[in-house]
Each structure stands twice: as C-alpha cells, then as structure tokens.
C-alpha cells in the first residue's frame, strides 16, 4: 500500500476543491450569459402610462421583495457572498440594452430565479417599461 504524507493529501483535497469551485462558477456564468443578440432585443410594447402602470403592479408582486420599492435594493435584504439583489436603476444595467433586462427577468440569473414560467412575455416587457421609467 502506498503511503502519502498527510500534508500532501490535504493539499490535493484543497486543490481539487478549488478547481471544482472555479469550474462550477465558470459554468454558472455560461448558463446566465446573455448574448449580444438577446441584449439587442427591442421591446415590442410601447412605453406608455398604461404599460408602466401594469409593469409597476407586476414588479410590486414579484420583484419588490428583493429589489425594494425603489428598485435599488430592499435594505431589509442583506447582501451575502452569494446573493445581492441588483440595483435596477444602475445606468450600467441599461447600457446592456432593454433586451438584457427582459431576458434576465424571463430566464433568471443565478441566484435570481427565472420568471418565464410565472409571467408572460408581455408582463416581462411591462416590467422593463416600468423600470426604465424610473430613470437612473
């Protein structure tokens, strides 16, 4: 039987653990990446008072709990190493394109769940119009 030094065994375990974590994180980012084509998706629903009001209602029901009533981040929801709700008024978010916001709502982005099964595409676009109306 081959005997190894305990420090070498510990090093190997740590090295494989770090490799696993890096691989897992890379895979998660690939899953949630939004293509340029998706980011450039144009909103088919005109931004009008009716759409903004509908978006606000849907936002209040599904999004406000984490992102807060002002879309910055609910102060009662503390950030952790793995979870921190996005500031939905951040200009960087909107530079990616309204399609990126739509696809993030629809398909989710770890750890945010996808809402495509609960909300129609129209509802997701109404949320986009509402958020856009808030400005940065």
Image (cartoon, rainbow, N blue to C red):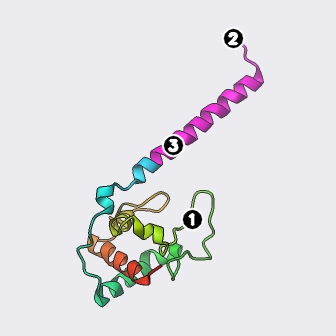
Report x, y in % for residue 6.
Answer: 76, 23
Image quadrant occupied by the N terminus: top right
Report x, y in % for residue 136.
Answer: 48, 79
Mark 2: secondary structure: loop
Furthest residue toward top: 1
**Residue 6 falls within the magenta-colored stretch:** yes
Do callouts 3 and 2 mark residues in contact (Cβ within 8 Å)? no
Q: In this figure, which residue is indicated by the disc labeled 3?
A: 24
Furthest residue toward bottom: 49
From what the image shows, is residue 86 above or below residue 48? Answer: above
Q: Which of the 4 image quadrants contains residue 74?
A: bottom right
Report x, y in % for residue 24.
Answer: 51, 43
Q: In this figure, which residue is indicated by the disc labeled 2?
A: 2
How many numbered badges does the structure rendering display? 3
From what the image shows, is residue 105 above or below residue 59? Answer: above
Mark 1: secondary structure: loop
Q: Residue at x 62, y 65 (%)?
A: 79
Q: Which numbered marker is on residue 16? A: none
Instruction: Say whether residue 95 is left or right of residue 85.
Output: left
Instruction: Say whether residue 30 is left or right of residue 43.
Output: right
User: Which range of residues does the magenta coloring cover?
Assistant: 1-28
Q: Residue at x 44, y 59 (%)?
A: 109
Q: Which residue is drawn at 33% across and 56% down?
A: 36
Q: Which of the 4 image quadrants contains residue 45?
A: bottom left
From what the image shows, is residue 95 above or below residue 61? Answer: above
Instruction: Measure the alpha-carbon separation of dots 3 and 2.
Output: 31 Å
Instruction: Say whether residue 21 is left or right of residue 51.
Output: right
Instruction: Measure the alpha-carbon separation of dots 1 and 3.
Output: 19 Å
Furthest residue toward left: 44
Q: Which numbered marker is on residue 84? A: 1
Q: Which is more N-terminal, label 2 or label 1?
A: 2
Viewer-nearest residue: 45 or 79: 45
């Amino acid at each position: 039987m081959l005997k190894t030094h305990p420090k070498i065994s510990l090093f190997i375990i740590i090295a494989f653990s770090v490799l696993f974590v890096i691989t897992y994180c890379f895979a998660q980012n690939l899953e949630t990446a939004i293509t340029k084509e998706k980011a450039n998706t144009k909103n088919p629903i005109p931004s009008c008072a009716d759409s903004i009001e509908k978006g606000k209602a849907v936002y209040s029901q599904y999004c406000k709990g984490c992102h807060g009533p002002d879309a910055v981040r609910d102060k009662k929801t503390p950030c952790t190493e793995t979870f921190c709700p996005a500031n939905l008024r951040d200009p960087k978010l909107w530079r990616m394109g309204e399609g990126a916001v739509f696809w993030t709502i629809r398909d989710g982005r770890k750890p945010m769940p996808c809402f495509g099964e609960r909300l129609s595409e129209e509802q997701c676009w109404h949320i986009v119009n509402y958020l856009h109306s808030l400005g940065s």
